[in-house]
Image: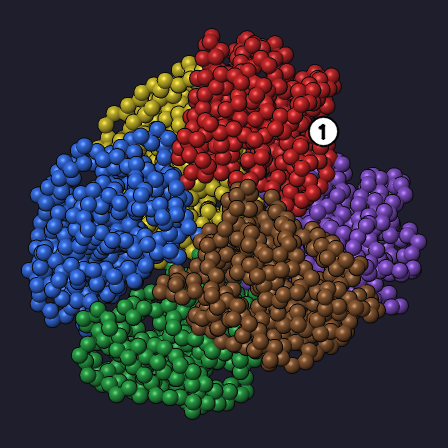
Chain colours: A brown, B purple, C red, D yellow, E blue, F green
Amino acid sequence: MYVDMPAAQLPDYRSSQVEPDDFDSFWDETIAAARAAASAVVLEPVDSPLATIDVFDVTFSGFDGQPVKAWLRVPKGVTGPLSAVVHYVGYGGGRGHHLENLLWASAGFAHFQMDTRGQGSGWSMGATPDPVGTGPQYPGVMTRGIDSRESYYYRRLFTDAVRAIDTVRELAFIDPARVSVFGQSQGGGIALAVAGLVPDLAAIAPCVPFLCDFPRATVITDAYPYKEIRDFLAVHRDKTEAVAAVLPYFDGVNFARRAQAPALFSASQMDATCPPSTIYGAYNLYAGEKSMSLWQYNGHEGGGIVDEQRAIAFFRTIDGNR
Amino acid sequence: MYVDMPAAQLPDYRSSQVEPDDFDSFWDETIAAARAAASAVVLEPVDSPLATIDVFDVTFSGFDGQPVKAWLRVPKGVTGPLSAVVHYVGYGGGRGHHLENLLWASAGFAHFQMDTRGQGSGWSMGATPDPVGTGPQYPGVMTRGIDSRESYYYRRLFTDAVRAIDTVRELAFIDPARVSVFGQSQGGGIALAVAGLVPDLAAIAPCVPFLCDFPRATVITDAYPYKEIRDFLAVHRDKTEAVAAVLPYFDGVNFARRAQAPALFSASQMDATCPPSTIYGAYNLYAGEKSMSLWQYNGHEGGGIVDEQRAIAFFRTIDGNR
Amino acid sequence: MYVDMPAAQLPDYRSSQVEPDDFDSFWDETIAAARAAASAVVLEPVDSPLATIDVFDVTFSGFDGQPVKAWLRVPKGVTGPLSAVVHYVGYGGGRGHHLENLLWASAGFAHFQMDTRGQGSGWSMGATPDPVGTGPQYPGVMTRGIDSRESYYYRRLFTDAVRAIDTVRELAFIDPARVSVFGQSQGGGIALAVAGLVPDLAAIAPCVPFLCDFPRATVITDAYPYKEIRDFLAVHRDKTEAVAAVLPYFDGVNFARRAQAPALFSASQMDATCPPSTIYGAYNLYAGEKSMSLWQYNGHEGGGIVDEQRAIAFFRTIDGNR
Amino acid sequence: MYVDMPAAQLPDYRSSQVEPDDFDSFWDETIAAARAAASAVVLEPVDSPLATIDVFDVTFSGFDGQPVKAWLRVPKGVTGPLSAVVHYVGYGGGRGHHLENLLWASAGFAHFQMDTRGQGSGWSMGATPDPVGTGPQYPGVMTRGIDSRESYYYRRLFTDAVRAIDTVRELAFIDPARVSVFGQSQGGGIALAVAGLVPDLAAIAPCVPFLCDFPRATVITDAYPYKEIRDFLAVHRDKTEAVAAVLPYFDGVNFARRAQAPALFSASQMDATCPPSTIYGAYNLYAGEKSMSLWQYNGHEGGGIVDEQRAIAFFRTIDGNR
Amino acid sequence: MYVDMPAAQLPDYRSSQVEPDDFDSFWDETIAAARAAASAVVLEPVDSPLATIDVFDVTFSGFDGQPVKAWLRVPKGVTGPLSAVVHYVGYGGGRGHHLENLLWASAGFAHFQMDTRGQGSGWSMGATPDPVGTGPQYPGVMTRGIDSRESYYYRRLFTDAVRAIDTVRELAFIDPARVSVFGQSQGGGIALAVAGLVPDLAAIAPCVPFLCDFPRATVITDAYPYKEIRDFLAVHRDKTEAVAAVLPYFDGVNFARRAQAPALFSASQMDATCPPSTIYGAYNLYAGEKSMSLWQYNGHEGGGIVDEQRAIAFFRTIDGNR
Amino acid sequence: MYVDMPAAQLPDYRSSQVEPDDFDSFWDETIAAARAAASAVVLEPVDSPLATIDVFDVTFSGFDGQPVKAWLRVPKGVTGPLSAVVHYVGYGGGRGHHLENLLWASAGFAHFQMDTRGQGSGWSMGATPDPVGTGPQYPGVMTRGIDSRESYYYRRLFTDAVRAIDTVRELAFIDPARVSVFGQSQGGGIALAVAGLVPDLAAIAPCVPFLCDFPRATVITDAYPYKEIRDFLAVHRDKTEAVAAVLPYFDGVNFARRAQAPALFSASQMDATCPPSTIYGAYNLYAGEKSMSLWQYNGHEGGGIVDEQRAIAFFRTIDGNR
């Protein structure tokens, strides 16, 4: 069933999320510090049974110079310069197994799939620690370190994501002008964040993105993971305002205002996990070129493989040279 | 939690399933009729964005000559003769999207993924009709046509599966001696059936196979799809014996008695959908070389991608020439 | 809780369902073909322990001349001409056991309870096959053959239902002018279809009817069986328009526009299975005399036995001669 | 799935329920007091639309002379002496609507369907109050008045049931030697109680009977209503022994020891509400002639209409003269 | 998620509940009768391990003079006159264990925690019988005796609650001018009732009060216990009007119109058990001074201990002398 | 229902958990390091409305000298030396609100309720961070840092708990010989750990203790939080052995072998969260004096307030001087 406002109202919806004055300086300083702490990327070839793709086990420097894992998959024997797709994954998962997610490299892209620090134990495997503690938190990462914008989990994760772009662009066989970003759910939310923080991406495809429009998302659905915030505030009644002051720094709505890359969004009218209005909250303010696939009969799976198929075509059109 | 007998008892468990006298003649006649009704396979190249794999939309003749769809994925530019993997899919799904399931072709196999007649609407898309009616049935296919062995749904599906092997072996670029079979859940059950019906397969890898040991499977779990049979018999109380006479012709236990191909099984101690004892019911009688991956902390997902990774290595060892 | 719009808005609600130009010709041809293929009805007396009712096991010709079962129950020793009630049953069920559903014959009617092809395995037993295959479908019958109006399951079932009326009217001891129709849920949806397809019924009583106003029904509830369509389209994303073109031929809204028989509807404000607005979608366009029992605190059970009691009184008043 | 011990062990199972020394005197005094307080039965004809059955709205004297309702349905125009069936109903329900439950009268019996005091609001309607208060109790009637055998709800209900037999036997058109008893679930438990308290019943048919073998029933299932007792004792930890001393007076096991009427039981191997071993706890000690229908694939619905069909045949054979 | 109308609309919401003409006379007579039947309160010291609090096991006269239990907890060694808090408890619970609920006495109040007749078996223990019978009812107390305002369960419980105030005021060491009332959920509903029936309470703190605005509460939520009424009327379809005529005598909306004591309410925007609009239905008509804590991210737990902390401060401010 | 082996078998059950050779040195070094890093405890009086109890907001040095919060509640005006109870809390919770948990101080003990690092957001509030990162983990703390015994969350939490004992004993008004320990569920598991690590506690009362007998606990129940480990290993299939090597250092079974303090345990036969056999796994090896309350009809709530009442009596008897 439809879980949100009628489709006709979505284009006119405006999020009530506030835009902090120091949003840009907060992120500028955060990213500058990460870059300053970075060391050289390490690529180790993986001994895989694949005949058509080379896989590399990547370790790069993320937030505060902390090591972050990724898989880099490239079509075998291709010398570049390649178009690249940086891929962020959904909540609870990690970069998975190196034999999974072969689509992007099979389609000819250098596929850089970033691991998700401290997650990677729910529906796919991860290998990256989150070497930073937390205040009292509800299980999951939605309230990890939520006591301040400095300590909030997503400050670290979004910074890792920006650093993943940096890392890919520095690889010899990648064309830095043709780096696009793909992600579903949390991965889509990260894609939006990166689009707001990195000015010259080729394109982004945030599918059913999470982490958008917190003021609405935390009150119109009972689905996790947004509900982690609700559960936390149900116990920490005195932190409602403090949390409301932290979340604007991490809301896709505010990243969307700053983004310039052409974007292909998707949303689903039956998605209780990331209700469509919360995605339109970001989409309607997105400052770059944009289009939306609104799926009528889907839930949080959105367009699934069709979203990916469309993203491949979209990135190719943008890249212009395939 | 463990859903079945202790692991130590599994190797000694023997299914109570009976073996009908005319099991072989029933299947011989069924398959002979299908072969007699067959027409030539049709391969249409798919216009895909893949750079490393060629995909073909296959239509071949299944049960009673009825058209069955498949995807054939082969590493681009390879001329053969290739090792092939015939892949059957799980309950409710179909052959899916042509951009999905790229592992096997990426690993260098000709990957023939058979569609599942009349299913393909639950978790992955299918395109093959089941052009045969049914008596009264419980929703799903477990009781479709269950009134007789002739009309039972799985007679048609298993025959399609045998015909898929026939079809692959006839392809010019495939080495017919190096055709292996892979399947998970229902796909694993089909793999077992094929192993009992086709004498000279290279190898099979039935992962967490379904459709084994019906006398036990229908009474020790409340998980679907086995429960479809229970739900049917709860209403059709007068058909308990008739159904018990039909199912032995379709039970992995009886196919296992006849199978000769080397086999790599998997099962999970926390799998309520295909409880491990039902799989050992077939495994313990399996007449060929065999080994088992018993997963301690997994449910019906079994070893997942690791089961696939092991199957790749197993098939390669068997093929001996990669 | 109320699951739909406020009661005060229901009378003004108008369905968005379209009316195909060739709706009438589609059905005229379908029914004419069925009548042309019909053979003579067979009535076999059932050896029952009933002292007050004679039960006959009926086989009549339905869609395409295919055999359909029914129970005919008549008060013992009554010679007619009798008023008759043709009774269609709810989703998943069948004609049941001959000792069930004694109300209508006990009330003096010839009670013709039609079986439901291919169902009859969920909450009551059936005996009628659906000897026609299907494309890929979601479990159940909502998407069986949904690829075209010709192949859709409900084309066959509604034709069976029309043929049930034909059959009853041809029985010697029935007064063909006093044939009414009763059904709950799916049975109510069939009753509406028959009312739109057979011009001179005495009366109909569609209780909490299913199969009305698909454009709304498939998006405002998560309850099955409407959700089968949603689940099918969630996988077959490319078939949304095709399905939307098939369903108008089977929507109670379009049958209601054509119906002339006096009608007694019921609906429930707490019915998530058949939300009241979907029923009002048909009711508000119903072209014959009509009245509605709107139950405030009921779910899909509606008025239950009270709906039946009212239908008996209603049919008697219409018949005018008891 | 099977919810209890293997079928082969059921015939050897012995309940651990104790037999109180004063069981007989407790019940003798209770019933004698009820009989002493009784006033004349009142039968009011119901204005029903039924053509084959006459229905009477009965008020008779139950426990402590309190008024209890029933429906009496008799085949129209039959003058007797009739065989009678006294019918007790399941947990939460009442005597229902007078148009329901037409089977027994249609089969030629005088059908006396007793209402259930204070229940009749869950799945069928009742009209009989329980004009006695209660100590603290868990919702439902399982712990109503459970503080003592004198105040326990089932003391009143079982006495009503005995008084129903008395009442039927006093009706002019009933043959008092041909009074049988039927009940499902709670109704089956009441049937057992009556069989232990009334010495000369023609026959009983307790189907999937409830209220048997409390020491086992309260610990091997999480299904309600047995779980009401568990929930009560989870809060009233200090009453475990007191409750254990009250329940033996109301346990079908102890009534079974005393019963002499021929009995047709049923039980289901997949019934979590009334697990089969608890029924065998009573069945194995049943002192009269007995037989059992053990349903393999059913839950608490047991044999449903087939149990009823068998009971009709059984009662007729016993009566010998129909 | 928010379960009700937006917070901004709550202050303007007006309940549709009617106000019966004889509301006051009904209650005046009921309470006068209870007072006339009262006997002297009994206080028995409890042998507890507490060092700072004396606990008394209280038996006082409630409805119709029936004995009602309570705990009285007072700070050890305090001689008074004390401020008192009369405390009513939530649905299904009772006065609990004497070692529970030490907050109020620890804060210096005489804490009189009334038991709840016939409940006290769900989440906390009770010891008070409800020595009055009932008509057919749904499990729980919401429909116990609902056939008439005279027999309805809450007539007795609210009268007990008024008598608890009487009892406390008569105690030598209590200052009768400083008796306040606290309750959560059902306890809050009782607090409102008492505020409407006892003219000179010091203050009340109804937290997330239940039993308010029945016309809306019974149709906008599926949560129990309001749903008990819905379930009852789903079966007793003919009693909808009768029940609608009984409930106004017990609705917090009508008590609120009469209340004069300063009041501190709470409600939660995510409370499906007692939706906020139903509480505002009473709050908006509350005739005394009032304030509301509306919790944004809480469910039925409301402000929990913070509601209690605020109530302590509120009562102290009112009492003016601590 | 009973969720585990029969009660009669529990005393003979022996856990299969191994005892690492370096168990003692691991813990000795861990605790020595924490003590070396400790700074002075800070007690700040809380401005509470309590009249009978003084509450202090405590900050003490836990693992690695990290600050840990606690509440200290003492009967007002008592000068000591007091008996003390150190209280650890259940999974997901924290020290809660200072107005909660007044029992122990009301009973005359100095009540030191330790906060739980990084939790305190589920059912009660906490204020203590866990300033240490983690590898990939399943939501919750069961797999936080589980990659090694050094990094595992419970190494830090158990060390905090030992330091809480140290802290209490250093308080001037506490008699260090009369320090007992109380905890339910996770709190009970911590109590066992402390009993194994601190040699001279007065007594412990572990109620329905968690964190016992991991080899069995992780496979015989589907209840969280044990299931977090199962879920983690279902994804991290390659870590099964590594995790099995870490957990023995944190298993109540191994702490029990070392404990000397007299102990009062509780367990429940219907507790799926902490099944009774897992508790007997520790209890049966407990090296000190011991007794067990085995609750027959309870789940994870165990004896609740009665367990607390018994613990009060037990501690007093041990202390001997109250």
Using the image as rendered, state which of residue C208 and residue B229 is in the foreground: C208
Q: Crowdedness of circle 1 by 10 Å Cα count: few (<14), some, many (20+)?
A: some
Left or right, F75 with reference to F300? left
Occupied quadrant, residue F238: bottom right
Q: In the image, what residue occupies the spot 9% across and 56% down?
A: E176
Q: Which residue is mark 1?
A: C150
Occupied quadrant, residue B50: bottom right
Using the image as rendered, state which of residue A304 and residue C149 is in the foreground: A304
Q: In the image, what residue occupies the spot 88% across and 41% down?
A: B38
D241 shown above or below F16: above
C270 shown above or below F318: above
Q: In the image, what residue occupies the spot 82% across and 68% down?
A: A78
Residue F133 shows in the view:
yes
Q: In the image, what residue occupies the spot 11% across and 64% down?
A: E321
Left or right, A298 with reference to E306? right
| Place of residue F139 in the rendered image (x, y in percent of width and height, measured from the top left) | 52, 66
For numbered disc 1, what is the local secondary structure?
loop
Residue farthest to the left, as pictured: E172
Count how many numbered circles sit on residues in the image: 1
| Place of residue A80 in the rendered image (x, y in percent of width and height, measured from the top left) | 80, 68
Residue F18 shows in the view:
no
Q: Chain of mark 1?
A: C
User: What amino acid is found at the position of numbered circle 1 in the picture?
Assistant: Glu
| Place of residue C225 in the rendered image (x, y in percent of width and height, measured from the top left) | 57, 38
Left or right, D248 with reference to B276? left
| Place of residue D307 in the rendered image (x, y in percent of width and height, measured from the top left) | 51, 35
Using the image as rendered, state which of residue B57 and residue D67 is in the foreground: B57
E60 shown above or below C227: below
